[in-house]
Amino acid sequence: MSIKTNTVRATGTLVALSIAVTLFAAGPAGAGGLRAGSLGSAAAPSATTDVERPQGQPGPLMAEGAKETFSAAATAESGGPISRSTVIARARTWVDAQVPYSQSDYRDGYRTDCSGLVSMAWNLGTNAWTGNLDTYADRISKNELRKGDMLLFHNASNPVSGSHVVLFEAWTDSSMTSYIGIEQTPPNAVRRVIPYAYFKNSSSYIPYRYKNIVEDAAPATAGVYRPDESVFYVSDKSGNLSGYAAFGAQGDVPLTGDWNKDGKDTFGVYRPQTHTFLLTDNNSTVTMESTFGDAGDVPLVGDWDGDGTDTLGVYRPTNQTFYLSDSNTSANVNHQTTFGNPGDTPIKGDWNGDGTDKIGVYRPAESDFYGAAKDSTTVIYNARFGNPGDTPTTGQW
């Protein structure tokens, strides 16, 4: 991918992007930790910070009881995708409130012990314990740790002896010998510097990543695709050129999306002649390719299953039918819905804010937008906006 600093006049097909500047400009490599002086209110470690912790058992959320307390962290719907920043923000509500460690008290429906805090931060919708938290996660390496992951030690032979879990927030520096962790431990929830992997039983702690965690979205900036050059141009927040990349060929339809669930949009094209999607996760080479749909189909991409990854789809004008896939490497149709009238323009959007993209149509004659429920023809969004001849766009503005 080329990196240029000259000024360019942005004329082409407008695309909306959330691409980090690091995709276009080289920077120092190293562990992504906090810089010196940025530890905030994290407490320093001491020689007597580890204690024995009784273990609570798995159980449902506690919605009743005199000792149960709710806070802002209890308002989100549980069990779905959750961003890394949201996990940390939820965990810090207990730190800020200095929630006491207890196996008999509950806050936000969750037991106020170490596994209860992680259950709450991940928004599991149930009270897990150190003996089953790993079933909600995938094992990762130390080098893969990122904010919102956990370090888990479960002593199966004697759970009350040492078993514990800590939320990882960030490395303190590039040596990866200590980190900022959030934990529920006597006397109360704390955010502090912890030597890797923990004060005691360090070799027994295993890093895990919640199965439903998604990367934080980068702020959107403007971009254009210049058809005669087959080049994507991307701006920074100030509207200055931050980089560009040649990708595709003349006649291709430009696409952007988060193809690999890393929280960053990258480029793609749809080749009408062969009805093939060509996608890249490095803005340089084709990393995913799939033939999908038929000649004459209109391409569209979206997060159809709410897992944080944008995947393929087409709209067939001849029968007003959407064919959507939950994969970028196979031609399987996972969602098929007939919606709209002849002459409508296909659109997509998260019409009800539940984290899943859904189909819709724009009716040019009346400037009407119609958004459907997931895998349904039920209209859940309708708006008349613009003038005849306008080109429709949708987004979470």
Image (cartoon, rainbow, N blue to C red):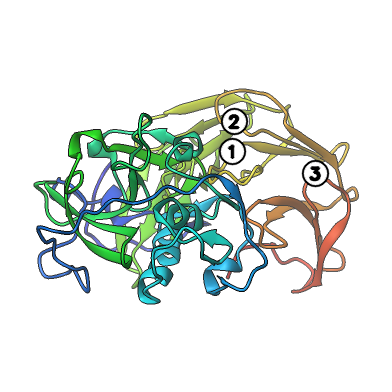
Looking at the picture, tell me which residue is in the foreground, 120 or 285: 120
Q: Vertically, is 27 above or below 367? A: above
Does residue 380 lie above or below 385 as drawn?
A: above
Q: Amino acid at mark 3?
A: Asp
User: Residue 311: which numbered mark, if any?
Assistant: 1
Is disc 1 in contact with disc 2, using a CB cutoff of under 8 Å? yes
Residues packed near mark 3 inside 10 Å, few (<14), some (14 to 19) or many (20 plus): some
Contact flag, marks 3 and 2 (Cβ < 8 Å): no
* Label 1 close to label 3 by CB (< 8 Å): no
Amino acid type, label 2 = Ser
In the visual, does 141 lie left or right of 211? Answer: left
* Marked residue nearer the N-terminal end (1 or 3): 1
Q: Quadrant of the C terminus?
A: bottom right
Q: Earlier in the sequence, mark 1 or mark 2?
A: 1
Q: Alpha-carbon neighbours of circle 2 within 10 Å: few (<14), some, or many (≥20)? A: some
Judging by the rendered image, the residue that carries numbered circle 2 is: 327
Residue beneath disc 3: 375
Q: Looking at the picture, does residue 226 appear above or below residue 112?
A: above
Eyeballing the image, is 1 above or below 215?
above
The alpha-carbon separation of the residues under discs 3 and 2 comes to 16 Å
Mark 1 to mark 3: distance in Å? 15 Å
Q: Give the distance between the C-alpha atoms of the residues marked 1 and 2, in whole angstroms.
A: 6 Å
